[in-house]
Amino acid sequence: MRGILRAARAILVKDMRTELRSREFLGNTFMFALLVIVIFNFAFKINAQNAPQLASGILWIAFLFAGTLGVGRSFQAEKENDCIQALALSPVDRSAVFLAKLAGNLIFLALVQAMVLPAFVVLYNLNVMENFPMQALVFLLGDVGFMTLGTLVAALSANLKAREILLPVLLLPLLTPLLIFAAAATSALIGGDDPAVYLSRIKFLAAFDLIFFVVSTLVFEYIMDEL
Amino acid sequence: MNPLEKALRLTEHPALRAGLFLASAASMLAALYLSLVWAPAAAGETEAYRIMYFHVPTAIMAYLGFFVVFAASVGYLWKRNLVFDALARVGAELGVLFCFLMLATGMIWGKQRWGAWWLWEPRLTTALILLVIYVGYLMLRNSVDNQAVRARYAAVFGIVGFIDVPIVHFAIKLWGNVMHPVVIKSASDAGMPPEMMLALRVSLLAFLLTFASLFLLRLRLEILASTASSRLSGETR
């Protein structure tokens, strides 16, 4: 177990370093998420009355779109330079690669969210983070579930001919339950609902994460062999 | 003899084929008569309720097809036998076909009963998401050329997709409200007159046999195609 974590950390550090050196993707993805939020405003004519109802959905759609773009890149860079072969040859458990990619994608998404949220609060004039610890927990659990399936499907689609379109087509339907649970929890928190309401939704999110984390770690090695 | 050839031999067994086709044709005719003519009118429902005798079996066949994908996917990752891959593909195709039929018959019934083609109601919405997941599964299969890679990728997606099914249903139930007529609540208390129950059972049998016949035909084609393509790639190598 410790060997897996050490290997995962090494891969993660490598990925962070390449990202820091190129330093383009984070900014681009943030701009994209910001644009989604701005465009929704034109589509729905957001005002003080409808903002609380629409906010959680708009936020999660922006995260899902931006995250799907970001996650597609996690195996692409490895493919382009045939680094994936070296990863596959390295004498570490396959799950180390999965954990590292998952962690990298999580950090990436969290950074995008940290940049998008203040902009959202200002533009929509709505304090989404009123109940900060709970809302942060919802984001964390939503991100983990999203990126677990996202990393798995990104690995699946890295080799495909039409990967740009297939990644979202394969990933988004699988994420419907997550979107429902996460948007429902966020909106319950924004609306100041009874704690029982958002706590039950947070529990569903946690269950979703747990189920797919276990399944994805188990099946990942079968994809990794063929990447 | 390799496993693919063995499976091919089975799909071409003359007695099995003829028996299945005759049985499905006969039972489908019987189901049509029983459900459209013989079964009594339902209290408080117009004659359009009779589409239920086809709507319910198509729904069960859709889930059966998707279950075949799951079981065959697990089988493939476990045994690395391409017969399982062929089974999974055929299961997905038939699942998509019957899922589409379930949605179509459901929408026709819904238009009559609710006055709208579509309601964002849990069972309908779940079926729609399922259809999208498994159409995605087939798209994934079509975009990988290498047979072994395709089989593995498809198996992984087939497993993850099937595990998602109950979660999708649960989530959508949380999100939507329940309006769907629950025809069969439990095996003991069907809440239906025995004649209706009989017609539904015969129809279910007819659909099962039709499913099996289509499965056999499609499996034979799939195995032939898969053998041909592996021979072709063997020659070019």
Image (cartoon, coloured by chain):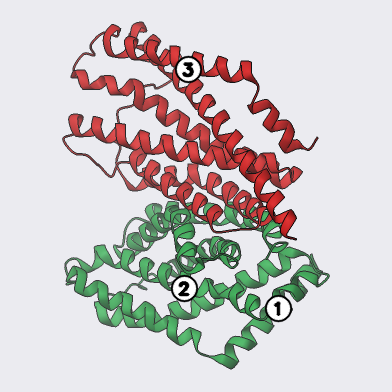
Chain colours: A green, B red
Local crowd size for mark 1, using a 10 Å CA cut-off: few (<14), some (14–19), many (≥20) = some
Q: Nearer the viewer, residue B81 or A111?
A: B81
Identify residue for label 1. A83
> Residue A204 placed where, x, y %?
48, 52
* Of the two numbered discs 2 and 3 in the rendering, the one whose residue sits closer to the viewer: 3
Q: How far apart are labels 1 and 3 at the CA level?
A: 54 Å
Q: Chain of mark 2?
A: A
Q: Are marks 2 and 1 in contact (CB under 8 Å)?
A: no
> Residue A198 placed where, x, y %?
40, 56
Q: How far apart are labels 2 and 3 at the CA level?
A: 48 Å
Image quadrant assignment for residue B46: top left
Residue B151 is left or right of residue B115, and the answer is right
Tell me, yes or no, if residue B192 can be seen here: no
Q: Nearer the viewer, residue B233 or B59?
A: B233
> Residue A11 placed where, x, y %?
70, 78
**Please, what is the three-letter code of the amino acid marked with disc 1?**
Cys
Tell me the number on the disc at residue A69. 2
Judge whether B146 appears above or below A100 on screen.
Answer: above
- Are discs 2 and 3 both within one chain? no
Helix, strand or loop at mark 3: helix
Sequence-earlier tag: 2 or 1: 2
* Of the two numbered discs 1 and 3 in the rendering, the one whose residue sits closer to the viewer: 3
- Are discs 1 and 3 both within one chain? no
**Please, what is the three-letter code of the amino acid marked with disc 2?**
Leu
> Residue B134 placed where, x, y %?
48, 47
Identify residue for label 3. B24
